[in-house]
Amino acid sequence: MTDTGRRVPRRDSPPGPVDRYPAAPRAAAAARRLALRHPERCRVREVGRSRGGRPLVLLSVDEGPHAVLVVGGPHPNEPVGVAAALRLASLALTRPPRPGLAWHVLLCLDPDGAALNEGWLTGPLTAPRHYEHFFRPAFEEQPELLPPAGGERTPMPESLVLTGLIDELHPFLQCSLHGVDFGGAFVQLTRPVPGLAERFARSVARGGVPLDVDSYDAVGWDSPAPGVYVLPARGRDGLPRALPDDPARSTWAYASRYGGVTALLEVPMWAVDSVGDAGLHPDVRRSVAAAAVALRDRAEQLSELLPLVPAHARAAYGPLLRAVEFNLRACPLLAREWLADWCERPLAVSRVTTARIVAERIPLRAASMLLRLLGDAGGPAADAARERARGVVTGSLERLGRLGARWVPVEAQVAHQTRAVLAAADCLLP
């Protein structure tokens, strides 16, 4: 206490390194402890419930008209976002308040999906164990992607929570914390942010991960600097058509109605250094065609196993089944697009590498979820189906290993995402 009797706001020391990802309930508990320790600056509130009834928790640090909204856990198989969201709030409390600046951290946007991945968080952080507990929803069940206006599909409760927060806070910056399983770091922006590219590249180098200079997730997007991509306008030609995502119809673009910019920050769990190679690939036709054929063939093999999923698994694990079906439907469309549009073009080593990663990743994900669905199916046919699915998982992980995939420590992932968010805020604030 000072001699005036006023309480001096407590400042924590910077948070120490982490070697694990927190599950969403653990992150929420940590947020509440922060609020108890810092009642002058910090508050926690439940801003809604998921489809499964789980709480969506918002941690706010300081108050003011200049709001940063940080979204953790938009994809449940990317737990780094939950860890980085919590780290950002902790870091904000180690710094003196900046007049007018408020941090609002939504700890986990998809707690239902996160619960289906939690098994990995409690054991060794290896690739085989990650995919043993893997879940990523189909596109229409991802909260950041909004349904077409006037269509039959309505927004998910989680989507309405996020758009409601944007309507309430009018953030000048929204940061969506993503992670790729294999590849490099990159940032996608709804509009250019002067000065961010240089700071982002320095953070990537400091973290010892490659910068993805021709990302598959941003094919056809403008790239003002390596690893930086700007959201294309709706209806722009030259964009991939195989997947039904429409970035212009998303919560990323939603913040622009209030003049805000959104940054999607990606960091890999397993780095593949060749995604940082901007040089021309020496044999595009052969490499892309091989990846396309492999993707199509593995999808056909896995599609033959779907009828063996027992009825009780279909009823109990509907999201898993729909995710498998979505992924397997997408594979032949992707393969056709690559064969028709990419084989005759000069492409960077980075783009060809990411195509090879995708050709392994999608069947790997589908096979992993199929194994969960087939877990207690009985009989010789089910045994054979599990063996075939395990073969896809094992083969994909071996081939990704031959691409040079290497684990990025959790602390390096979290530290980079945290630095990137702080850099984006610094670049946009006057």
Image (cartoon, rainbow, N blue to C red):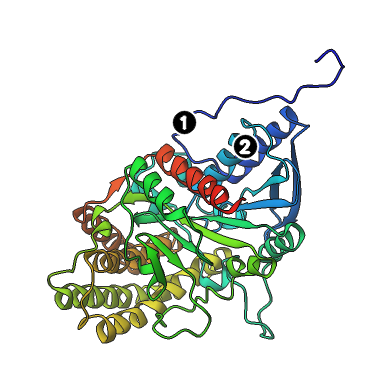
Q: Label 1, secondary structure: give it.
A: loop
Horizontal side, residue 112 vs residue 415: left or right: right
Amino acid carrying label 2: it is Ala
Horizontal side, residue 205 vs residue 1: left or right: left
Which mark identifies residue 17? 1
Horizontal side, residue 302 vs residue 5: left or right: left
Q: Residue lying furthest front in this view?
A: 430
Q: Residues within 10 Å of mark 1 (few under 14, many from 20)?
A: few
N-term mark: 1 or 2: 1
Amino acid carrying label 1: it is Pro
Q: Which residue is mark 2?
A: 92
Q: Residue lying furthest left in this view?
A: 282
* Residue drawn at point x = 58 percent, y = 41 percent: 88
Nearer the observer, 110 or 263 = 263
> What count of labels does the image hold?
2
* Residue drawn at point x = 47 percent, y = 68 percent: 230
At which x and y percent is residue 210? 31, 51
At which x and y percent is residue 399? 21, 59
> Label 2 near label 1: C-beta < 8 Å?
no
**Is the N terminus in the top left, top right, bottom left or bottom right quadrant?**
top right
On the question of residue 378 being in view, the answer is no
Q: Residues within 10 Å of mark 2 (few under 14, many from 20)?
A: many
Q: Label 2, secondary structure: give it.
A: helix
Nearer the observer, 413 or 326 = 413
